[in-house]
Amino acid sequence: GDSVTQMEGPVTLSEEAFLTINCTYTATGYPSLFWYVQYPGEGLQLLLKATKADDKGSNKGFEATYRKETTSFHLEKGSVQVSDSAVYFCALSDTGFQKLVFGTGTRLLVSP
Amino acid sequence: EAQVTQNPRYLITVTGKKLTVTCSQNMNHEYMSWYRQDPGLGLRQIYYSMNVEVTDKGDVPEGYKVSRKEKRNFPLILESPSPNQTSLYFCASSGWNQPQHFGDGTRLSIL
């Protein structure tokens, strides 16, 4: 079945450092890809998405490009802030965005 | 404000005592879903509903029931909770071909 693999955390960075969180996927069809963010004590919020190969999703300074050839959707940000500290989930959906398959999540800790 | 509301947010209970976690959305979404989040496993789908009176099993449905009598509500029922159902639960909703909106979560502890 479909699956998503994320790098294990925690990822610990200093403020203004460059961030990469790796995500690769396995799917039989042509899924849509997502990054969700979970701040402490809150639910998941959609951060960005891409629906086809070579699409780039972006939001709040975060970016991820749908790479079909490497089955990857790595999350990047050029300069992280303390307020970016959260858990980040990569996910895919095969069928009209209805069922999401999640990775295990990567905790990001940013220190001042 | 568009939102998915879950209640309760926290619950500690004992094995075998039936409980219900409510979920309500105000966006007129057709699709609703329940997930559980466990350390090292990410989120896994328990049940989902495509519309009123239409529900189906997700990846981990054992020990859970759901119902969808109204479009806005999708309660999760644990008829006889057991300690392995201690987890963080999320309800989500979406329209067709739209990203899912999540509630703030319900943390269940079953002793």
Image (tube, rainbow, N blue to C red):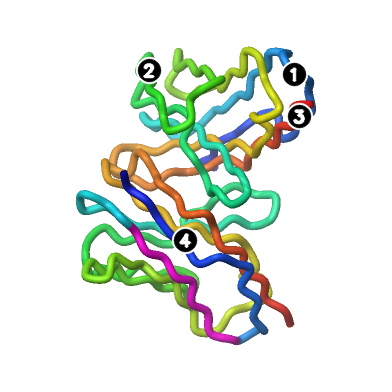
Task: Look at mark 2 in the image and give the residue it sits on.
Answer: B52
Q: Marks 1 and 4, Cα distance to the nearest angstrom?
A: 37 Å
Q: Nearer the viewer, mark 1 or mark 4?
A: 1
Q: Marks 2 and 1, Cα distance to the nearest angstrom?
A: 31 Å
Q: Nearer the viewer, residue B25 or B66?
A: B66
Circle 3: element type: strand
Q: Main secondary structure of the magenta part?
A: strand
Task: Look at mark 3 in the image and give the residue it sits on.
Answer: B11
Q: Nearer the viewer, residue A96 or B85?
A: B85
Task: Look at mark 4 in the image and give the residue it sits on.
Answer: A47
Disc 1 residue type (three-letter): Thr
- Chain under disc 1: B
- Chain under disc 4: A
Q: Quadrant of residue A14?
A: bottom right
- Chain under disc 3: B
Q: Marks 4 and 3, Cα distance to the nearest angstrom?
A: 29 Å
- Chain under disc 2: B
Q: Which mark is residue A90?
A: none
Task: Look at mark 1 in the image and give the residue it sits on.
Answer: B15
Disc 4 residue type (three-letter): Leu
- Give the residue drawn at x 40%, y 46%: A101
